[in-house]
Image (cartoon, rainbow, N blue to C red):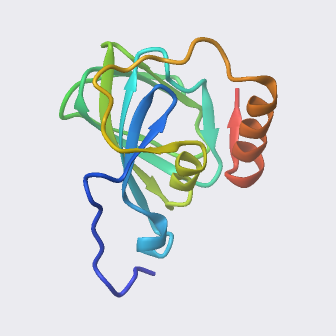
Amino acid sequence: MLTEQPSFTQANDLRAYNGGFFRVLISPEQTGGSFSIIDITLPKGAEPPRHLHTREDETFYILEGAIRFEIGDQVIDGEVGHAVFAPRNIEHLFTLQTEQARMLTLITPGDFANYFVEFSQPIEHAPTTLEAPKGPPPADVLALLVSRLTERYGARFA
């Protein structure tokens, strides 16, 4: 069920995440959990490993850069203006083909957007340069991350 009041996101609602940054344009709280939309910019090398979502579908709309998606056994080379759908329970990953890329991610239902908020920090301005993290996070952070992704958000890793 959608909320009864219209909502909007301000341009300064930026958060740092995995060497890049994002903002939640529409939160699950604004839609009664129906969906969420994230505007995310990532550097090459900050992509997630192959995984699947047991609860959500993801739709990616490329705004900048080029991204190769592997969804199940399909390989899709996405460019600016392309939309790519990754259904729940299908393993997928994406690989940036450019030094950085920006995309809108529609998450349905929307709760998984809260993962990004949980594992990010607020920032005042978009960084002028992006750099992927060097190596994995510390073991305790990685354990928490995997635990939250699998238990709270229903993600699974290949």
Q: What residue lies at 73% left-to-right and 46% top-to-bottom?
A: 148
Q: What residue lies at 63% left-to-right and 12% top-to-bottom?
A: 135
* 65 displayed left or right of 46: left
Q: Which residue lies furthest to the left in this view?
A: 81
* 56 displayed left or right of 139: left
Residue 97 placement: quadrant: top left
* 8 displayed left or right of 119: left
Front residue (pair 84, 149): 149
Relative to 58, is 91 above or below?
Answer: above
Image quadrant in which the N terminus is located: bottom left
Q: Which residue lies furthest to the front in this view?
A: 124
Relative to 84, is 72 above or below?
Answer: above
- Rendering coords of residue 119 (x, y %): 60, 43
Relative to 50, is 14 above or below?
Answer: below
Q: What residue lies at 42% left-to-right and 59% top-to-bottom?
A: 36
Image quadrant in which the C terminus is located: top right
Residue 140 placement: quadrant: top right
Relative to 30, is 90 above or below?
Answer: above
Front residue (pair 124, 56): 124
- Rendering coords of residue 5 (x, y %): 32, 84
* 73 displayed left or right of 123: right
- Rendering coords of residue 29 (x, y %): 48, 71
Front residue (pair 9, 103): 9
- Rendering coords of residue 35 (x, y %): 44, 63
